Image (cartoon, grey):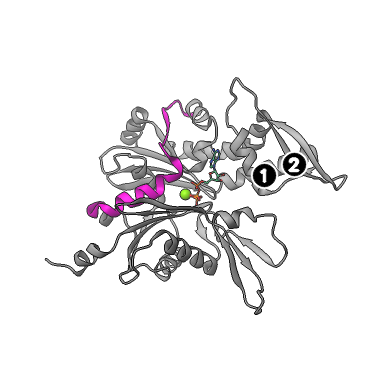
Amino acid sequence: MFHIDDLLSVFTSDIAIDLGTANTLIYVKGEGIVGNEPSVVAVQEKDARGAKSVRAVGKEAKEMIGKAPVNISVIRPLRDGVIADFDVAHHMLRYFIRHAYKRGSFIKPRIAIGVPYGITEVEKRTVREATLGAGAREVFLIEQPMAAAVGANLPVADPAGNMIVDIGGGTTEVAVISLAGIVYSKSVKSAGDKMDESIIDYLKKKYNLSIGERMAEQIKLHIGNAYPSDKREFMEVKGLDLVAGVPKTIEINSDEVRESLSEVVKSIVAAVKIVLENTPPELAADIVDKGIVLAGGGALLKNLDELLREETNLPVIVAEDPLKSVVMGTGKILEDINLLRTVSLY
Ligand SMILES: Nc1ncnc2c1ncn2[C@@H]1O[C@H](COP(=O)(O)OP(=O)(O)OP(=O)(O)O)[C@@H](O)[C@H]1O
Ligand SMILES: [Mg+2]
């Protein structure tokens, strides 16, 4: 039967979005990823007319973290994978969509957006409203572990166990998927942000050095690791000496960073083990053959795959482009009408 949506789809593109705690990515059907920015907004508390206004969004706003004067608040509107500041999240989403999607605005796009597994009805409504408000004609909510698995090319529709571990900024979500459904899943708040906080705490305790969250992330990206390797690496770190009250530079090594990250890493490993223990035996047997697939930016932590291999005795594979798994998977699901019907949340 002819449907109005078929006609509309000639004029519009579908959009897939990964609205992440750390990064927001936007994919347009037929074009690929058209936007990839930190989920950060800088708000000027009072401008010349006494009103609130947005100073910067995305990369430019992230640069301002820890550097802004008192009248500018640098806000990350998502916490632990869910929207914490609705107004700012809504504004950010609208900004990203407008910048990434330059088609005429006369017909609104259909938008599929990734959400954490097991979010509440209230949280679902919040995401749906923010997406509709940002210009969507129709909204599909896709669970992120499913999206990550599809984005990592796992055969999610097969009657076989697929295990995905998505380590983001706010949460680590571990899931076993079979027949296009999530069989068992666990989400923990041990992920990238907690790693950064641990590095901050460690340097404070050990060296009386206070550093900002951006410096902490840089340390993690450069010499962070989860399992020892042959080569010890070093990095110069600048911060504030808490005793003398003056700026100070110290050198730290990769073993220290591993030590600082160990609690967070341990709870990621524990989450993986809990999911394995709760996986039905037939599906567990598939995972023994196919292994565990890691996605999300945290999958890039050096030697985390190595550690998981040792802890589980299973093959561990890092997805090809782990920061893009969720958005690519959401895009693929949006293009597959049967899969879209099966996996979208209502
Ligand atoms: N090479 C790397 N090593 C370690 N961590 C990394 C690396 N690259 C990125 N990260 C971390 O990955 C996190 C961002 O990952 P990602 O974009 O997948 O999160 P997100 O989807 O925004 O968050 P969430 O899924 O929790 O809502 C950040 O904490 C970032 O510091
Ligand atoms: Mg994510």
The residue labelled by disc 2 is 238
Magenta span: 312-339
Residue 234 in view: yes
Image quarter (top left, top right, bottom left or bottom right) of the C terminus? bottom left
Marks 1 and 2, how far apart at CA = 8 Å
Q: Which x, y percent locates residue 258?
A: 63, 32
Look at label 2 and name its amino acid: Lys
Q: What amino acid does circle 1 point to?
A: Met
Q: Main secondary structure of the magenta part?
A: helix
State which quarter of the image contains the N terminus. bottom left
What percent of the width, then of the height, locates residue 328? 36, 47
Some atom of ligand 1 lies within 8 Å of the CB belonging to the residue at label 2: no
* Tally of marks: 2
Residue 289 as seen in the image, left or right of residue 6: right
* Residue 278, image quadrant: top left
- Chain-order first, disc 1 or disc 2: 1
Taking the magenta stretch, the answer to whether it contains residue 191 is: no
Label 1 with label 2: CB-CB less than 8 Å: yes
Residue 291, quarter of the rendered image: top left
Which residue is the extreme one toward the top? 230
State yes or no: Cβ of the residue under disc 1 lies below 8 Å from any atom of ligand 1.
no
Vertical order, 104 against 264 (above or below): below
Q: Is residue 336 magenta?
A: yes
User: Which residue is depicted at the point 58% across and 28% down?
Assistant: 227
Specify whether 298 is left or right of 117: right
